[in-house]
Amino acid sequence: MNIYSLTSPLLFQFDAESVHDFTLKTLKTAERLAALKLCAVPPVCQPREVMGITFPNAVGLAAGLDKNAAVIDGLAALGFGFIEVGTVTPRPQPGNPKPRLFRVEEAQGIINRFGFNNLGVDNLIENVKAAKYKGVLGINIGKNFDTPNQNAVDDYLIGMRKVYAYASYITVNISSPNTKNLRALQEKEALSHLLSTLKLEQLKLAETHGRYVPVALKIAPDLEQEQINEIADLLMAHKIDAVIATNTTLARDAVQGMQHAAEAGGLSGAPVREKSTQVIQQLSQRLQGALPIIGVGGILSGADAVEKIAAGASLVQVYSGLIYKGPKLVHEVCRALG
């Protein structure tokens, strides 16, 4: 039995966001004391070449855990092949009122309605600059809650320009259900305008910095086949470098009647696994290898990760699975993927 399996029943007695904050503070302290390095055993698995980047292994940390890039070094010691921080917005914002994070333990799910709570992009950049981590770093950018959708592209341009020099790749998040009307940016006309504008900016920045930083789009699981096809076609048309599938779901059919199931927000963890995998399969069929897919959603075991790769993903990310399984999940997934 590992340490996490002994401590998690105690941690689960407390409010979920309080435990989240406590975990980040503990990681920060361990990072300062270099304690994690003493016990960290890097997983043994094959590197992957994706988006022109060499990933030490195929298992990444999804955005949302370390919104402000405050504990990159501590998280790196857990064995991830890549780390994605954010979502970060141009200006700091507090997010939605608390409580806003809930465990659906019966289904190994999490519901959150954080609402892009973060300290702003300038703070994130200072934290990235202070970190010792030299591995693959994704930076996930979003828009401020009070920026109207017709001006959303301006917020994404600010984010892209500011993080470009510090990111291995940049994720454009238009699929969180917790910022009002954000998912409307997935609609064909709005998405085409956003992607074309960001692609032009990416090419300008590549020339300015002498380095090409790939851009990925993160999409929702709550999409019809026609919408998935439209998004896939736009990704190819605008030469976007990757797609991350998927964010959290608004559906509750998998947790109906369970404690906290009626809470507003995005549902992640085991209940979203099947939806996420279906979206990956549908994207893969439409894209035909034109760009890579990063699979995320409901990975709580090595077998879950293998399922995502079989569906068409090149890499996987975990987050909610860490809450239920602990850091050993990274090694388990690595072993399963080889």
Image: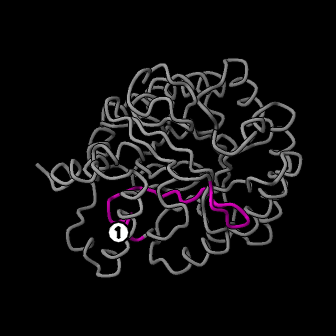
Residue 242, placed above or below residue 22 = above
Q: How was the colour assigned to the protein in this rendering?
A: one colour
Foreground residue among 133 and 35: 35
Q: Is residue 117 visible?
A: yes
According to the picture, the residue beneath numbered tag 1 turns out to be 27
**Label 1: element kind:** helix
Counting the numbered discs, the total is 1
**As drawn, 312 above or below 319:** above
Let me know if residue 327 is in the magenta part: no
Q: Find out whether residue 82 is within the magenta segment.
A: yes
Residue drawn where x is 79% and y is 58% of the image: 155
Q: Nearer the viewer, residue 16 or 25?
A: 16
Neighbourhood count class around disc 1 (C-alpha, 10 Å): few under 14, some 14–19, many 20 upward: many
Q: Position of residue 88 (x, y in %)?
A: 64, 60
Residue at 56% x, 36% y is: 264
Which residue is at a point 46% across and 57% down the rendered structure image? 82
Residue 44 visible in the picture: no
Residue 65, horizontal then vertical, whole percent: 47, 56
Q: Quadrant of residue 333?
A: top left
Answer left or right for 194 relative to 209. Answer: right
Amino acid at the residue labelled 1: Leu
| Magenta part of the chain | 73-95
Quadrant assignment for the C terminus = top left
